[in-house]
Amino acid sequence: MKIVFFVFVGLLLSGCGFFQETVTRDFSIDSQAMAEQRARVDLSCRNPKADRPIRRDSMTNWQYEIYSEYKVWVEGCNKQITYLVVCREDEPCRFADQIDIDP
């Protein structure tokens, strides 16, 4: 009976390791540069400045793909905007959403 218990616990714990995977590359600089470039147009501003992005690793529900999501705040010309940038290991980063523009 103890053997069955330990086998069950071992299998349970080994399955949990899959869900703890993360995107190994840090795309902070890429997402920050993308946000500044897009903010030039969205804010009509020549030199917007982005704060350091906040990273969150997630997994899609339907295909179990791991990706990193970066929330980037950009300010310029007395305006502020927030972007969500999604990055996967083998694909270029792309915008997921534009959250808001504050005048």
Image: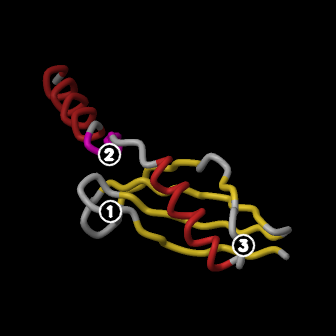
Q: Amino acid at mark 1?
A: Pro
The mark total stands at: 3
Left or right: 23 as drawn, with respect to 4: right
Q: Looking at the image, do the residues carrying marks 3 and 1 touch, with CB atoms under 8 Å apart?
A: no
Quadrant containing the N terminus is: top left
Q: Which residues are drawn in magenta?
A: 18-24
Disc nearest the viewer among 2 and 3: 3
Q: Secondary structure at mark 2?
A: helix
Name the outermost residue toward the top. 2
Residue type of the residue flagged with mark 3: Cys
Residue located 85% across and 68% down the image: 78
Which residue lies under the disc numbered 3?
Answer: 45
Foreground residue, 23 or 19? 23
Residue tagged 1? 92
Asked if 8 appears above or below 32 in the picture, the reply is above
**Residue carrying label 2:** 19
Q: CA distance from mark 2 to mark 3?
A: 41 Å
Q: Is residue 69 left or right of residue 98?
A: left
Single out the mark in the foreground, 3 or 1: 3
User: Is residue 21 part of the magenta span, yes or no?
Assistant: yes
Which amino acid type corresponds to the residue marked 2 in the rendered image? Phe
